Image: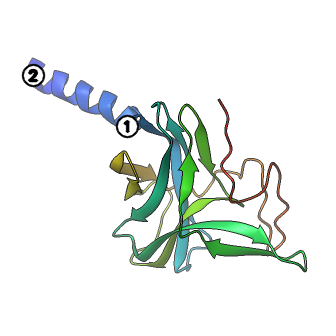
Protein backbone atom coordinates (compact mmCIF):
# COMPACT_ATOMS: atom_id res chain seq x y z
CA UNK A 1 0.00 0.00 0.00
CA UNK A 2 1.43 3.38 -0.95
CA UNK A 3 1.94 6.20 1.52
CA UNK A 4 -0.83 8.17 -0.21
CA UNK A 5 -3.26 5.23 0.15
CA UNK A 6 -2.30 4.74 3.79
CA UNK A 7 -2.84 8.42 4.62
CA UNK A 8 -6.18 8.43 2.77
CA UNK A 9 -7.34 5.30 4.64
CA UNK A 10 -6.30 6.82 7.98
CA UNK A 11 -8.11 10.08 7.25
CA UNK A 12 -11.24 8.23 6.15
CA UNK A 13 -11.24 6.18 9.36
CA UNK A 14 -10.73 9.29 11.48
CA UNK A 15 -13.53 11.22 9.78
CA UNK A 16 -16.07 8.39 10.14
CA UNK A 17 -15.19 8.07 13.84
CA UNK A 18 -16.04 11.74 14.49
CA UNK A 19 -19.56 12.82 15.45
CA UNK A 20 -21.69 14.25 12.64
CA UNK A 21 -21.49 18.06 12.79
CA UNK A 22 -23.25 20.93 11.01
CA UNK A 23 -23.39 24.54 12.17
CA UNK A 24 -23.12 23.76 15.88
CA UNK A 25 -25.10 20.50 15.81
CA UNK A 26 -23.27 17.32 16.81
CA UNK A 27 -24.77 13.81 16.64
CA UNK A 28 -23.22 11.41 19.13
CA UNK A 29 -23.62 7.71 19.86
CA UNK A 30 -26.27 6.94 17.23
CA UNK A 31 -27.70 3.46 16.83
CA UNK A 32 -30.71 1.89 15.13
CA UNK A 33 -32.72 -1.23 15.72
CA UNK A 34 -35.81 -3.15 14.66
CA UNK A 35 -38.15 -4.48 17.31
CA UNK A 36 -38.07 -8.02 15.86
CA UNK A 37 -36.42 -9.85 12.97
CA UNK A 38 -39.67 -9.73 10.91
CA UNK A 39 -40.61 -6.21 11.96
CA UNK A 40 -41.84 -3.63 9.46
CA UNK A 41 -40.73 -0.81 11.73
CA UNK A 42 -37.58 0.29 13.49
CA UNK A 43 -36.10 3.28 15.28
CA UNK A 44 -32.93 5.31 15.67
CA UNK A 45 -31.57 6.82 18.85
CA UNK A 46 -28.77 9.31 19.53
CA UNK A 47 -27.65 12.34 21.46
CA UNK A 48 -28.05 15.66 19.67
CA UNK A 49 -25.74 18.39 20.97
CA UNK A 50 -26.12 22.04 20.06
CA UNK A 51 -22.73 23.68 20.59
CA UNK A 52 -23.95 26.87 18.93
CA UNK A 53 -25.29 30.06 20.47
CA UNK A 54 -28.78 29.79 18.93
CA UNK A 55 -31.61 27.41 19.84
CA UNK A 56 -32.45 24.95 17.07
CA UNK A 57 -35.05 22.26 16.43
CA UNK A 58 -34.93 18.84 14.76
CA UNK A 59 -37.95 19.09 12.45
CA UNK A 60 -37.71 16.02 10.18
CA UNK A 61 -35.74 12.91 9.27
CA UNK A 62 -35.42 10.93 6.05
CA UNK A 63 -33.91 7.60 5.01
CA UNK A 64 -34.30 5.10 2.20
CA UNK A 65 -34.53 2.31 4.78
CA UNK A 66 -38.28 2.95 5.24
CA UNK A 67 -41.35 4.13 3.34
CA UNK A 68 -41.86 6.84 5.99
CA UNK A 69 -39.54 8.32 8.59
CA UNK A 70 -41.12 10.33 11.43
CA UNK A 71 -40.20 11.89 14.76
CA UNK A 72 -41.97 10.08 17.59
CA UNK A 73 -42.26 10.03 21.36
CA UNK A 74 -44.12 8.05 24.01
CA UNK A 75 -46.85 9.61 26.13
CA UNK A 76 -49.01 8.23 28.90
CA UNK A 77 -52.76 8.42 28.31
CA UNK A 78 -55.39 9.03 31.00
CA UNK A 79 -55.59 5.27 31.64
CA UNK A 80 -51.86 5.00 32.34
CA UNK A 81 -51.13 3.27 29.02
CA UNK A 82 -47.99 4.34 27.15
CA UNK A 83 -48.61 5.20 23.50
CA UNK A 84 -46.24 6.16 20.72
CA UNK A 85 -47.22 9.36 18.90
CA UNK A 86 -45.82 11.45 16.07
CA UNK A 87 -44.28 14.78 17.09
CA UNK A 88 -45.00 17.09 14.17
CA UNK A 89 -43.38 20.16 15.72
CA UNK A 90 -40.08 18.32 16.16
CA UNK A 91 -37.66 18.30 19.07
CA UNK A 92 -36.06 21.45 20.50
CA UNK A 93 -32.29 21.48 20.88
CA UNK A 94 -31.36 24.48 23.05
CA UNK A 95 -28.17 26.45 22.49
CA UNK A 96 -25.41 24.87 24.57
CA UNK A 97 -27.69 21.93 25.42
CA UNK A 98 -28.55 18.42 24.34
CA UNK A 99 -31.63 16.45 23.39
CA UNK A 100 -31.61 12.70 23.91
CA UNK A 101 -33.35 10.40 21.46
CA UNK A 102 -33.70 7.21 23.44
CA UNK A 103 -35.78 4.06 23.77
CA UNK A 104 -39.04 4.75 25.57
CA UNK A 105 -38.81 8.47 24.73
CA UNK A 106 -38.18 10.70 21.74
CA UNK A 107 -36.80 8.85 18.69
CA UNK A 108 -36.64 8.65 14.90
CA UNK A 109 -39.21 6.10 13.72
CA UNK A 110 -38.84 4.01 10.55
CA UNK A 111 -42.25 2.91 9.23
CA UNK A 112 -42.53 0.33 6.45
CA UNK A 113 -38.95 -0.91 6.42
CA UNK A 114 -37.67 -1.45 2.88
CA UNK A 115 -35.03 -3.89 4.12
CA UNK A 116 -34.27 -5.73 7.33
CA UNK A 117 -32.15 -4.08 10.01
CA UNK A 118 -29.49 -6.67 10.77
CA UNK A 119 -26.95 -6.33 13.55
CA UNK A 120 -23.80 -4.68 12.18
CA UNK A 121 -25.53 -3.04 9.18
CA UNK A 122 -25.57 0.73 8.79
CA UNK A 123 -28.43 3.08 7.94
CA UNK A 124 -28.05 6.52 6.32
CA UNK A 125 -30.38 9.07 7.94
CA UNK A 126 -30.67 12.74 7.08
CA UNK A 127 -31.77 14.87 10.01
CA UNK A 128 -33.27 18.26 9.14
CA UNK A 129 -32.83 21.13 11.57
CA UNK A 130 -34.65 24.45 11.48
CA UNK A 131 -31.46 26.52 11.53
CA UNK A 132 -28.51 24.17 10.98
CA UNK A 133 -30.05 22.54 7.91
CA UNK A 134 -29.50 18.91 6.97
CA UNK A 135 -27.10 16.57 8.76
CA UNK A 136 -26.57 13.11 7.24
CA UNK A 137 -25.55 10.44 9.73
CA UNK A 138 -24.39 6.88 9.15
CA UNK A 139 -26.03 4.95 11.97
CA UNK A 140 -24.93 1.44 12.97
CA UNK A 141 -27.63 -1.16 13.60
CA UNK A 142 -27.11 -2.52 17.12
CA UNK A 143 -29.60 -5.21 18.12
CA UNK A 144 -27.67 -6.09 21.28
CA UNK A 145 -27.59 -2.71 23.01
CA UNK A 146 -29.64 -2.57 26.17
CA UNK A 147 -31.90 0.42 26.78
CA UNK A 148 -30.44 3.15 28.96
CA UNK A 149 -32.89 4.59 31.46
CA UNK A 150 -36.14 3.22 30.03
CA UNK A 151 -36.97 -0.45 29.66
CA UNK A 152 -39.32 -1.78 26.99
CA UNK A 153 -40.99 -5.04 27.88
CA UNK A 154 -43.94 -6.29 25.79
CA UNK A 155 -46.05 -3.15 26.18
CA UNK A 156 -44.94 -2.41 29.74
CA UNK A 157 -42.65 0.59 29.42
CA UNK A 158 -41.70 2.21 32.73
CA UNK A 159 -40.28 5.67 32.18
CA UNK A 160 -37.54 7.50 33.98
CA UNK A 161 -36.59 11.15 33.94
CA UNK A 162 -38.78 14.12 33.04
CA UNK A 163 -41.92 14.35 30.96
CA UNK A 164 -41.63 12.55 27.66
CA UNK A 165 -41.59 14.83 24.64
CA UNK A 166 -39.66 17.45 26.57
CA UNK A 167 -36.01 17.94 25.69
CA UNK A 168 -33.48 16.88 28.25
CA UNK A 169 -31.07 19.72 28.81
CA UNK A 170 -27.83 18.28 30.06
CA UNK A 171 -25.31 21.06 29.96
Distance between mark 1 and mark 2 Cα atoms:
26 Å
Q: Which residue is mark 2?
A: 4
> Which quadrant would the C terminus be assigned to in this image?
top right
Give the percent coordinates (x, y) of residue 66.
41, 74
Q: Say if 135 sits above or below 97 in the image.
A: below
Q: Residue at x 56, y 56 (%)?
A: 91
Would you say 135 lies left or right of 4 here?
A: right
Closest to the observer, 131 or 2: 131
Q: Which residue is mark 1?
A: 21
Disc 2 crowd, CA 10 A, few/some/many (<14, 14-19, 20+): few
Q: Is residue 46 visible?
A: no
Give the percent coordinates (x, y) of residue 71.
53, 66
Q: Say if 15 sits above or below 166 in the image.
A: above
Badge 1 or badge 2: first in the primary sequence? 2
Give the percent coordinates (x, y) of residue 42.
54, 69
Q: Residue at x 47, y 37 (%)?
A: 54
Amino acid sequence: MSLKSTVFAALTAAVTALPALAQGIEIEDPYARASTMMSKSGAAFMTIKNTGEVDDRLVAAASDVADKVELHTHIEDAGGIMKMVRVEEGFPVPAGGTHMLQRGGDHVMFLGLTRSLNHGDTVEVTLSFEKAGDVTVTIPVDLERQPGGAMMNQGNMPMTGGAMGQGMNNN
